Image (cartoon, grey):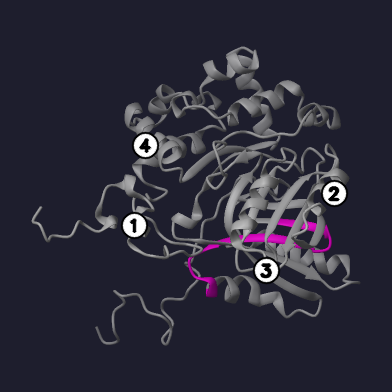
Amino acid sequence: MPENAKPAPAYLLGTDEKQKWMGDYFFAPRGLGFLEPGIVGLDDAKMSAYNVAKSSYQIHPEVFNMDYLSKAVGLGRDEIIQRMHRLYDEHLIVYVMNPAVSVYGWGLYYWLVKLREGTAPETKAKLAEWFQDKDDICTGYECKGDFDFFNGNHMRVIDNLLADVIEPWKNNPEVEYVHLCPIRRCLRESHINMFDFSGEGYREVVWGKDELAKLAKHQDKMDMLDLKILQALNAKRPMEEVFDFKVLSEISGLDPKEMLSGIKELVETKRIIVPLFHLNFMKLGLTNHVFVIRLFQNVPCCRKAQITDELSRIAEFNTIMEFSDSFYDIIAWAYNEVNDIKALKEKIYSYSEIEDVKEADMNRMFRRWVCRLDDQNGFWEECMFTDDFLQDRTEKNGVRCCHARKEGE
């Protein structure tokens, strides 16, 4: 390289340079959604192992590594397959994938809805059905308590969220407020530590002490062996031990070595997706108790992150997320029926930095990362991914694509 030559910009370097491009700046550019170098599309060949498994596990549970599962659970291959068929057919589990949306170019915007006191149950039910059927809402919950709904959208353009998802009902007389809760960090979801979890716990499966045993006694749809299968399916291990790549290859005709290489890169190296089995808590008669935490405004972001990290060490919280640019800062939830909610509340209130906490119980889940969960309507696992295709690109005076043709062309 010539003496005065500058090195290539970080964004032109290899994909292992993900996020290192920020080192070119004194204050690293940040946002809720920023498309990183090295990110692949969800239909990229590197996603093949997940995509083939997602589209076939309902019929062929053996796409998962039965040798590993048999050893971990202590059951034979055939019984595990039989149990997985039943767990899926009874809509107790569903296979999904969490993408690290903030580096895929999306902002992840959750939002609280509070209805006015005295709102008729049928009015709330009507709004709930609208949320259930709105394909742009990727994850959503109905609640009882200090607020009535907690829904989420991954969006590149916040105007589309405001105009198409929230505006149609925001000014209804029964709506007291809508508060946005943009996600800064996702630490744990569905009992699994996500990409934003601090320390060495990424992809670890977390349950509270005796929580699985209590859950087995609480209901009659999943026994302890079923729960151990769920545990083993989600257990942190090398990706070559997650799938049976021979079976994936037989189903798809794709090269097993290429499928393994691709999924290892995305899950283990880049940490941009986490495949997992989600437990349908509604079917088990569980409700989540939700704590929405507001810190004093003079608490710096570093301390907010520390508090979130400290709460994430509490195993009873099956979900922990940190908000940004919101009235609220942290959300955490745990099952009412198998946990000591009073003790968890006392732990939260032990922090002097906490100004206020809103609480509610989640009794219904609409979708799980675009997978519909309303099996009563025949839509189990039905997926709709809309992103920002809400915008009418044909509108005469609207924002135009760079390749949009001018009038007369």
Q: Give the foreground label among 2 and 4.
A: 2
Q: Residues within 10 Å of mark 3 (few under 14, many from 20)?
A: few
SS for callout 4: helix
Say which residue label 1 marks: 21
Say which residue label 2 marks: 346
Q: CA distance from mark 3 to mark 2?
A: 23 Å
Q: Amino acid at mark 4?
A: Gly
Q: Residues within 10 Å of mark 1 (few under 14, many from 20)?
A: some
Q: Is residue 281 above or below residue 303?
A: above
Dot 2 or dot 4: first in sequence order is: 4
**Which quarter of the rendering shows the C terminus?**
bottom left
Q: Is residue 219 above or below residue 357?
A: above
Q: Residues within 10 Å of mark 4 (few under 14, many from 20)?
A: some
- From the image, give the main secondary structure of the stretch colored magenta: strand
Residue at 41%, 80% in the rendered image: 399
Say which residue label 3 marks: 298
SS for callout 1: helix
Q: Give the foreground label among 1 and 4.
A: 1
SS for callout 3: loop
Q: CA distance from mark 2 to mark 1?
A: 42 Å
- Residue 66 or 292: which is nearer the viewer? 292
Q: CA distance from mark 2 to mark 4?
A: 45 Å
SS for callout 2: helix
Residue at 28%, 56% in the rendered image: 10
Q: Residues within 10 Å of mark 2 (few under 14, many from 20)?
A: few
Residue 39 percent across, percent down from the top left: 37, 51
Horizontal relation, residue 312 to residue 350: left or right: left
Dot 3 or dot 2: first in sequence order is: 3
